[in-house]
Image (cartoon, helix red, strand yellow):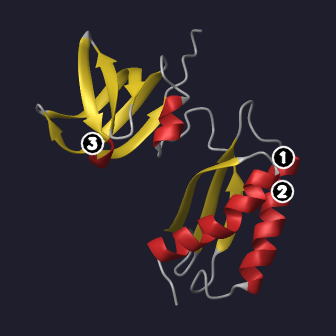
Amino acid sequence: MDTGNNSIARVWQLAAPLAANEGLEIIDIELKPEGGRSGRVLRLYLDKEGGPSLDELSRVSRGLSDLLDEHEDVVDGPYTLEVSSPGINRPLKRPEHFSRFVGKKIRVRTRDMINGRRSFFGELLEVSAEKIAVQQDGTRWEIAFSQIDKSNYEHDWSA
């Protein structure tokens, strides 16, 4: 039976056509311990320009729930399925996620130190297949995707 990353990859394969059918994109999938002793949550974050509707999220949730019931070996053991929007400060995981936010503020945490720092917050200047460029306090920082541990868009509430 699959566990961890294998389960997430298989859920992604099952969920992608359902999400695409609703005009949605999978932003992230998590399988995490939560709640009780053996409680786990399988959480999918879906988005589209303008944000997903509750109906769209519900249709994907029902369809995925049915598929996971058919493919019992995808997620080993009990879990709770949650399908939601990633929220306003959405995570950025893939190059195409970053591309949408060029010119906007993002927050990035790296796996290793880059010139003495691991935390960056600033304007996303550009995105290539291998890296991003962020401007923070007048300095341009180039960060390889392989170095990014966690990153997200930071909504500008003053705009």
The amino acid beneath tag 2 is Ser
Q: Position of residue 78 (x, y in %)?
A: 63, 83
Three-letter amino acid code of the residue under disc 1? Leu
Please say if the residues under marks 2 and 1 sit with CB atoms less than 8 Å apart.
yes
Q: Quadrant of residue 63?
A: bottom right
Contact check, label 2 and label 3, Cβ < 8 Å: no
- Foreground residue, 7 or 127? 127
Q: Of all residues shown, which one is farthest toward the right?
A: 55
Identified at 31% across, 17% down, the residue is: 135
Secondary element type, mark 3: strand
Tag 3: amino acid: Thr
Disc 3 target residue: 110
Label 2 neighbour load within 10 Å: few <14, some 14-19, many 20+: some
Q: Earlier in the sequence, mark 2 or mark 3?
A: 2
Q: Which residue is mark 2?
A: 58
Q: Quadrant of residue 86?
A: top right
* Image location (x, y in percent) of residue 46: 67, 49
Which label is found at residue 150? none
Is residue 82 visible in the rendered image? The answer is no
Q: Tell me the element at label 1.
A: helix
Q: Position of residue 153 (x, y in %)?
A: 50, 30
Which of the numbered marks, if any, corresponds to residue 54? 1
Farthest left residue in view: 116
Q: Which circle's residue, 1 or 3, is located before the other in the chain?
A: 1
Please tell me whether mark 2 sits on a helix, a strand or a loop: helix
Residue 39 shows in the view: yes
Image point (76%, 69%), residue name: 64
